[in-house]
Amino acid sequence: MNHSATKEHHKLLSEHFGITAIPGQFTVALAGNPNVGKSTVFNALTGLHQHTGNWPGKTVDNAQGSFTYLDRSFLMVDLPGTYSILAHTIEEQVARDFICFGKPDVTLVVLDATCLERNLNLALQVMEITPKIIVCVNLMDEAEKKNIKIDLSALQKDLGVPVVATAARSGMGLDTLRQKLHEMSIGLCTPTPRQISYSSEVENAIQQLLPNVSRLIGSNLNPRWVTLRLLDGDQAFIKSISQYLNLDLHSTRLQEVAV
Amino acid sequence: MSAVIKPMTTLEEICTEAEKIRLSNPDLGDKIVSDIYQNAEMIAGPAVIKNSTDSRSWDHKLDDILTSRRLGYPIMFALLSIIFWITIAGANVPSQMIADTLFAFQDQLLIWFELAGAPSWLTGILVLGMFRGLAWVIAVMLPPMAIFFPLFTLLEDLGYLPRVAFNLDNMFRRCRACGKQILTMCMGFGCNAAGVVSCRIIDSPRERLIAVLTNNFVPCNGRFPTLIAIATIFMGGMVVSELQTAVASVVVTSLVVLGIFVTFAVSWALSHTLLKGEASSMVLELPPYRKPQLGAIFYRSLIDRTIFVLKRAIIMAAPAGAITWLLANIYIGEISIIGHLAAWLQPFAYAIGLDGFILLTFILGLPANEIVMPILLMCYLSTGQMMEYGTLEELRDILINNNWTWLTAVCTMLFCLLHWPCTTALLSAYKETGSKKWTFLTFLIPTVIAFIVCFIVAQSARLLNLV
C-alpha cells in the first residue's frame, strides 16, 4: 500500500470503526463463534495492552489491543462472537462490516476444535470476503480430552489458508500464530482460499447478476460475494455498501472508473 | 458479453434485478445457507477423526441434573443462598477493620483541620460530610463486593450461568421475553448500570427494552448492605445469634426471588401492553464446563467489576455526603432542613409503612443507593454527621428508638428492593435506549410498583392488627 492509500485507510478505520492505528501498524481482525476461547487468544496475544469501547453508533462492545512481534506492531480488533456473518443481528453486521470494509491486514478466525464442522461455517463465509485469513483451531487440549483428532495438514490443504492449532489457555501454538500473522501482514504469504461451491440453483442466479455487479464494484470487493448478499436481499448490506464505498444508489461513478 | 446483457449501471438497478431473481426463487436465501453448511460438512468430514468415547458423558450427566425440571430450580436457589451466606458471613470482619482504620484517620483529619485553623463549616463539609460518607461507602461496600464478585465470576467461568439461562428460558418465553435476560439480571446483582449496559446481548430490540426496564428489580450491590443490615437485625434478631447469618441469608435470598418474580410479572405485562410481540427464537448454547482460571477471575471480578462499581459509588457519595451534611446542619427555626422535609413527607410515608425520614433518605439516595443507610442514621441522630454503626446491636437500638417495628423493616426492605433506579442506572438506560420516554418509564415502573406493594402490605398489616 502506498503512503496516501495507507492514510486513506487509517482515516476510514477511525471514522467508521473508531479505531486508531499508528502509522506502520498492521490491523488484525479477530473473529469466531461464541465460547471458542476467542477472548483467551486475544488476551494471550495482547496482554494488558487493551482498551474497550463501543463500535461507533452501535451498542456493541469493541475491544482493541496491541502487540509487537519481530519489531512490527499489530493492532488486534476483537470482533463480537458470532455464528455467521450473514448479518441477522447487529453483532454479525458489525463483524461483517469490519472484515469487509475495514480491510484488516489479516482476519484471524478462531475455531473450536471440539466442534469444527459448525465453526467452519464462519470461516468459509470470511474466506468469501477476503483471502487474507488465518484459521486458528483453538481448544486443541479439550479436543484431545474428548478423543477428537484433527488432521491439520489436510484441513490446511482443503481450505487453502494457513491453519494454526492452539490451546490458548496453556499458550500452546501462540508463537506459530504470531509468526503466521507476521508473514501474512508483510505479504510473504497470499493464500488462495477455497470458495464455497453452491448448488446449481444458486450458481445460476449468481451468473445472472455477476457481470453487472463486477462492473459496478470493480476490485473493491469480491463481486461473487456481493452478488450473493444482494441475492439474499440483505438490506443492511446494501446500506453498508453505499456508506463505505461512497456508492449512492444511483451513482455510476465507479463504473466509469472501472471502464 | 456486454453486447448481450443490457448494461446496468446503478446499485439500485442491480438491487431490482436481484429482487426479481429472488422472487422467482423464493427459497434462495435458505439455499445459500444450507450450501454453506454442506461445504463445512464436506471439509470437516475427512479432517476430523472422532473416536467414540464416553468422556463427553460426564458433562452431559451434569447438565441433566443442573437443568432438570425437578432439581434445576432448587439447585439454583441453593447456590444463590450459599453465595449470599458466604458474602454476609465473610464481609463482617473486614468491614469492621476498614471502618476502624478509616475512622481513625478521620479523627486524625479533624485534628489537622483544627491545627490549620479551618472554619467549622469547612471541616463539617469536607471531613464530616464528604470523608465520612466516603469512608462509610468503602467500608460497607468493598468487602461484600470483593467476596461476591469473585464467587459470581467463578460460577460464570465454570459455565453455570448459561445453564441458569436455560432453566429460566421457558419462564421468560411465557412472558414473551428473552431467556438471556437472566444474564443481564446477573450483571444487575453487581450494579444495575452495568446490568442495563449488558442488555445489549439481547438481539431483539423489543426484548432488550423489556430487559432494560426491569433490570432494577434485581438488588444491586448498593442496596445489598441495606437489605443485609435490616434482615440481620430484624429477622435474624428473632433467633439465637448462631442462626442470625443463616436467617439473614434466607431473607435476602427470598427478597431476590421476589425481585425475580416481579421481573417476570412486569416483563409479561409489558409484552402484552406497551411492547407487544412474540418471543423471538434464540440459540442458547450450553458451552462445555471448563476449569476456571483463577487469575483471570480475580482480575476480572476485582479490577473490572469491584473497582468500577466502587469508583462510581465514591464519585456519587462525596457530593451527596456534603449536601446531606449541609441539609442536616442548616436550621430553619428549631428544626434542620432535613427535619422539615421529613415532616412534610410523613403522612404519605406512613401510608406505605415507612416514615418521613426513610422516604426522604431514599430520595436523597437517588445518586447512589449505598448512602441510604448512612443518611437515615444521620437523620435519626441529628448529630449533623453520618453515623457509622459500630455493631448491629447499636443500629438496632437506634431504629427501635425511632419507632421501627417489624412492619417498618419489611416495608423498608421491599421499598429498597423495588424503588427507582439510581441516577447512574438511569443514565445508562438513556444511553442504551436513546429515548427519554423509555428512560422515564425505567424510573416510573419501579416507583409505582414500590408504592403499591408497600401500601398493600402496610394497610393489610394494620387492618389485621398485626402491629
Image (cartoon, rainbow, N blue to C red):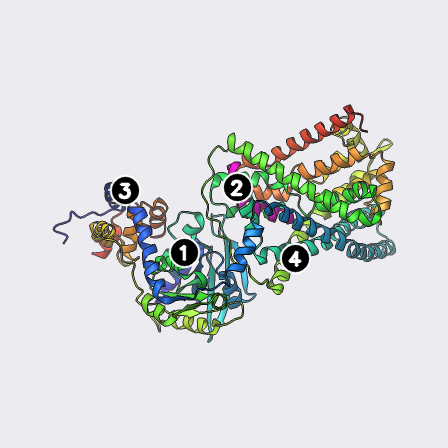
Percent coordinates x, y for residue B456 in the rendering: 70, 27
Q: Chain of mark 1?
A: A
- Mark 2 is on which residue type? Asn
Q: Which residues are magenta?
A: B169-191
Same chain assignment for discs 1 and 2: no
Relative to A21, is A254 above or below? Answer: above
Tag 1 secondary structure: helix
The residue depicted at 74 percent of the width and 34 percent of the height is B411
Amino acid type, residue under disc 1 in the picture: Phe
Secondary element under disc 4, as helix, strand or loop, is helix
Tag 2, which chain? B
Residue under circle 4? B150
> Residue at horizontal 72%, vertical 47%?
B317
N-term mark: 4 or 3: 3
User: According to the image, label 2 marks what residue?
Assistant: B170
Q: Position of residue B341 (x, y in %)?
A: 77, 31
* Mark 4 nearby-residue class (10 Å; few <14, some 14–19, many ≥20): many
The residue under label 1 is A98
Q: To which residue does mark 3 refer?
A: B26
